[in-house]
Image (spheres, helix red, strand yellow):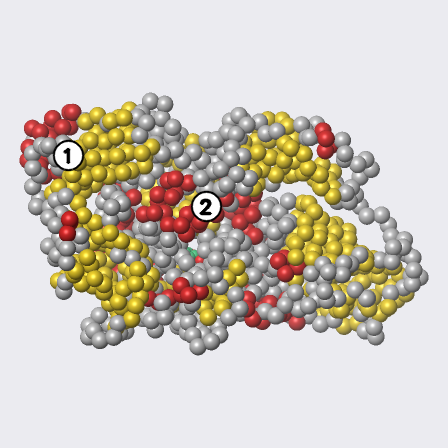
Amino acid sequence: MHAVDRRPGSLSLDGPWRFQLLPGPEAPLGDTWTRLEVPGPWTTQDTGDIPRYTNWRMPWPEYPPHPPADNPTGVHERELHIPAAWAGRRIVLQVGAAESVLLAEVGGRPVGIGKDSHLASEFDISHAVRPGAADTLRLTVVKWSDASHIEDQDQWWHGGITRPVLVYATDPLHLADVRVTAPADGRLRVDVQVRSADGALPAGWRVSAHLDGVGELAVDEEYAAWCAEEARVSDFLGEARLRAAVPGVRTWSAETPELYGLTVRLHRPDGSTADTSHHRVGFRTVAIVGRDLLVNGERVFIRGVNRHDFHPLTGRTVTPAEMRADLETIKRYGFNAVRTSHYPNDPALLDLADELGLYLVDEADIESHDHAHEIADDPRYLAAFTDRVARMVLRDKNHPSVIIWSLGNESDYGANHDAAAGWLRRYDPTRPLQYEGAAKTGWARADVASDIVCPMYASLDEITAHAASGEQIKPLILCEYSHAMGNSNGILADHWAAIEATPGLQGGFIWEFWDHGLLQRTTGRTAGRPAGRGGEGAYAHGVAAEGYRWAYGGDFGDTPNDGAFCADGLVFPDRTPKPALYEHRELAAPLRLSREPDGSVRLTNAQHFRDLSWLTAEWLLSLEDAGTRTAPAALPSALPPGASARLAPPPELMDRLPAGGGEAWLTLRVTTRGDEPWAPRGTEVCTPQIRLRERPAPPPPTASGPAVSLDADGLLRHPLLTSPPVLSLWRAPTDNDLLGGAADHWRALGLDRLERKPRSVDRDGARTLVRSAYPTAVGTVEHLQVFTPLPDGGLLVEETADLPEGLTDAARVGTVFETVPGLDHMEWYGQGPWETYPDRCAGGPVGHHSVRVDRLFTPYLRPQESGGRHGVRSFSLLSSDAGGGLAVRLDAPRQVSVTRHRAADLAAATHHDELVPRPRCVVHLDAAHRGLGTASCGPDTLPRYRLGAGTYRWSWSLHRR
Ligand code: IPT
């Protein structure tokens, strides 16, 4: 593995290949070939072998290093036409990635074997090919091997060739490696290794290098002279060293991804060019000083996300365009870092990270999870550990985006890690390394194979306590946190408040980017099979089209499996953003607003390297009762990173702030001024806001008109409602609720099957008092509803619920009712427009929002509580054709959800396609709603987002519109 990119000028072998799937590597080849698209795993191409999903357990019982007897083996064949002009050249076959063992043959001759499912294998096939003629190229891929035990990552198991296959040719004398060292001070160093096919170097070869905009690099004369004297050394190493000092260098960072083109040439004695290699150089320095990780001397926050190679049709094969779309999405939602969980990515991804500006934790393909303890010290795996780490580092060392190396994931900690770390520290002293398994043996230990404390899912208390302990000696950056499974990422704002306020805490990587739902057919002859490439376009807005669904573990009949645990990303399988992404975007905002005591607004540049000149903005004044007005905003473009400035709220808006009250919010809608490499001009970046005026308390009601009508059980009859308002204490369990234990708690209390017992009805003039009881396992909830007719024909509902001692941590305390059919549009004043919850609402600015009812609901793969909007003050449900509908005004900002599904409908379904939308709206108005937390893997919500026993009071009024 080397850092010379051979993709340019190569011959692509991608496309349809002949294919046979055998039951094992020893099985005889049959006569019948089918066709298979390469690259692409066979498990998504309808070959009979299925994708299997397990988290950490191996899908079969054999102990390391043994594979199972049943071992699907794919034989891939095609003709290889090497151009006649390549005769006499060194010809190399490169297979981008194959899982898990690759055997290559040309013209019936074995040319090599390869392992590591996420790095390329290269074979010198010069001796085996016949340029100008056709040879048969056969790539046999054995699915399971000793290596499977160290590729036990939490993802689908596939089999096959997953990255491009190509052949390239060089002179026998060629550039074998180029190593670029480009620190922020502009002192560039380029070390070049030259090799010849027969091992001998002819005299007189020469290497040159040119840096765009700067010029030719100088040869390191001292080194050259030394090499010349030590002729044997020179011949053996074939090494050249070149240097340049770049004055006024433009440094690379995630915010300023400045790249310089570098061309390295190998010249024959006659001066002609034997080989050329192109690079993009980013000048930047990474260092750890004390407990700070510094990029170019700056303590940067790491706003990261874990990303797997994933595609809903191919499983794992992704094109450069798809990788770009991933990274653009990642950038647009405020991330500046990616951990390549849990293996080296396609080289194209690293190029893109350099270009778009993302810090990478480049992770070796080592996860021995199920047998972690045995393998970490097992010398039979020693070579694999060091090989996997070294090959990654050798390949990726020139990428400025890579700021940290990772030894792998979830593999305990043993001698094999120390061996790899030893090599790595010596080979690349310019970057820190991290390994969670080593760090966790003692966060304050200096002597372990991790320069960073990189825990997964540590609680806020744990990490802040460590930072305050006086014992912290390394930066703390969570390698995984805020598990994005289903409706999740609660307390992200609390995380970032702590990180930004606590020296020693520097960020983390959300788990994870993708929901790994594979598109599966549900109807027709091929029902149950992966849709594969035939499913192109059979999805939109995160939802699979009719006749398809997003499959998770077990859906292909794969046993054992870990169910929906692979659906834990910030985007749906089609890359549609989930609401949590907006939360992150706002928390990562490059500029922040705050209110000064004199009423002026303070704006802070929260970036590390950039001023504000790339942004433009407008002001929005939102008034609860008088809509929204806008005015252009003048940003202080030259405001340096970290600095703040006072801004006058726009007079043309402030002048129109009506006297006499009503809540008012001032929002700065910030967009890109021009095109950024990751977003076109006009892309929304953040929407920070400040409250100008509080919401006044509602006036005391005056009753007017006839008292409400009730049925025999004391339930409200109302022309706008098809199901009367009753108490609700439950929600359809989210993945966090299910896996974290809250759902069991609610079941034990009986909240999932709460039944109303009428107690009494009292009339007091026009007011009607309805008392009900809701028995639970720990006592009865007493519920009072007071109905008062209002002068405008509306109805005021004042409610009180007394939760007995012991009834703590309910899902919600609130009202649920169902409307007449035909209301398909919601307008509201509150947080939005995206889904928000009490502990995930930083990304939903308060304002007037309007969304189709069907689009309020978030189609999480496994149906669950969804569609909530936090801080809703008032809303209307309208029919878009005939007009009219209903309006609700709440006493205080409340959690509201309007969907077409009852909580029980959601809880009963296993996949989104099982849900049948009701024609009516199911409306929840909550006095209180439990936070989401992240308990499917990690901390639950904080105590302040939980519900206690005691008295809850809330009121709302219902009006015709
Ligand atoms: C952690 C894994 O590193 C990651 O691959 C994924 O499984 C994640 O959890 C959960 O989705 S390991 C877990 C045992 C904490």
Tell me the number on the disc at residue 209: none
Q: Residues within 10 Å of mark 1 (few under 14, many from 20)?
A: few
> Residue 670, relative to residue 934: is it above or below?
above
Question: Residue 737, how many percent across, how many down?
Answer: 56, 62
Query: Does residue 430 appear in the picture of this structure?
Result: yes
Amino acid type of the residue that numbered disc 1 sits on in the rendered structure: Ser
Question: Residue 702, how many percent across, how many down?
Answer: 90, 53
Q: Which residue is mark 2?
A: 328
Mark 2 C-beta to ligand 1 under 8 Å: no
Question: Residue 242, how many percent across, how many down?
Answer: 21, 29
* Ligand 1 quadrant assignment: bottom left
- Of 651 and 145, the residue lying toward us: 651
- Give me the residue at 53% from left, 49% from top: 581
Q: Which residue is mark 1?
A: 272
Residue that protrudes farthest toward the bottom in the picture:
525
Label 2 residue SS: helix
> Residue 383, relative to residue 292: is it above or below?
below
Query: Does residue 818 appear in the picture of this structure?
Result: no
Residue that protrudes farthest toward the top in the picture:
247
- Give me the residue at 29% from left, 71% from top: 34
Question: Residue 498, how many percent across, how many down?
Answer: 53, 41
Label 1 residue SS: loop
